[in-house]
Image: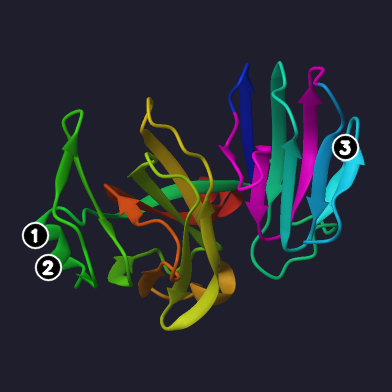
Amino acid sequence: MFVRKLSYRGKDCLFRDHTGQWVLADFEGPGHVTHLLVCPSDGPLVVTVDGQNPMLLEFPTDIYFRSCLSIGSDSPVESFEWAVTLLPPGCDPRCELTKPGSYKLTQTDYVDPCDSASRSEHALVAQNESEVFELEGKTHRSHLNRMAFDISIDPQNVGVVLRRTYDRFHGRQRARVLVDGVPIGYWYAPIEDRKNRWAEDEFFIPIGFTAGKSKVRIEIDPPAGTPLWDVSEYLVFAVKDRSTVDSA
């Protein structure tokens, strides 16, 4: 369970959709909006929950969603803030999963798709991959089809977090994630920023796919018609029960 926060002002938004609407929040998977603050705009927000008919709401709060959520506006807002709790695939968004502060992240691996030694170490293969580019002293590359690699993890995990550093010149990057050949969900990064291009994003792999394992194979598979999936590096973290870590 992870909380994402974002705030911006003026004529900023995640992206403009095909109708010209200012999209302020866009999520895939289950979750719960725990905080939303909007300064006045010319009209109510357009809120779409789980793909149902859009609702016009002045101050939407305490929103639960099982598959997707979108919040937009027909005109720019002065400022916008939200915090959302994102849950693992298949979870009931109304269930309490953990108590805050009860888990700790421990890094177990590092994958650099731009480095030949790292690619060999992790048995990394990719289809329709770009050349290596450099941006502000850091390398990155993108791929149109599947990339697969092995990662080392702590067998005593209660889940794993993949943290990607990437170029968000193109927004709405989306990819299916598979663990040991099993699809577990979609990794979606909607934000586009052509000025501050470097970003980090995370994907949570539930314990059912990682418990007792010291290594798993990850596949990142962008579906047809989506922007290229960009990556500079992946950091791998085991989610550990803090009481177990502290007593060790």
Q: Which residues are magenta?
A: 13-41
Mark nearer the N terminus (3 vs 1) = 3
First in sequence: mark 2 vs mark 3: 3
Residue 17 percent coordinates (x, y): 61, 45
The residue indicated by pointer 3 is: 61
Residue 120: mark: 2
- Residue in view at x 58 percent, y 75 percent: 208
Q: Are marks 2 and 1 in contact (CB under 8 Å)?
A: yes
The residue at 54%/65% (across/down) is 186
Helix, strand or loop at disc 2? Answer: helix
- Classed neighbour count for the residue bearing mark 1: other residues with Cα under 10 Å, few (<14), some (14–19), many (≥20): few
The question of residue 160 being in magenta is answered with no
How far is disc 3 from disc 1 in space, using C-alphas? 48 Å
Determine which of the numbered discs, if any, sits on residue 205 in the image: none
Can you say whether 46 is above or below 38 in the image?
Answer: below
Q: Is residue 99 visible?
A: no
Give the CA distance from mark 2 to mark 1: 5 Å
**Residue contact between numbered discs 3 and 1, judged by CB atoms under 8 Å:** no
Q: Where residue 151 sits: x, y (%)?
A: 31, 66
Given the current orientation, which residue lies at the most extreme front position?
19
Please, what is the three-letter code of the amino acid marked with disc 1?
A: Ala
Q: Nearer the viewer, residue 197 or 178?
A: 197
Q: Mark 3: which amino acid?
A: Thr
Residue 15 on the magenta segment: yes
Using the image as rendered, state which of residue 194 and residue 84 is in the foreground.
194
- Does residue 113 appear in the picture of this structure? yes
Residue at 81% from the left image edge and 55% from the top image edge = 49
Q: Secondary structure at mark 1?
A: helix
Quadrant assignment, res 72: top right
Q: Which mark is residue 117?
A: 1
Furthest residue to the bottom?
Answer: 181
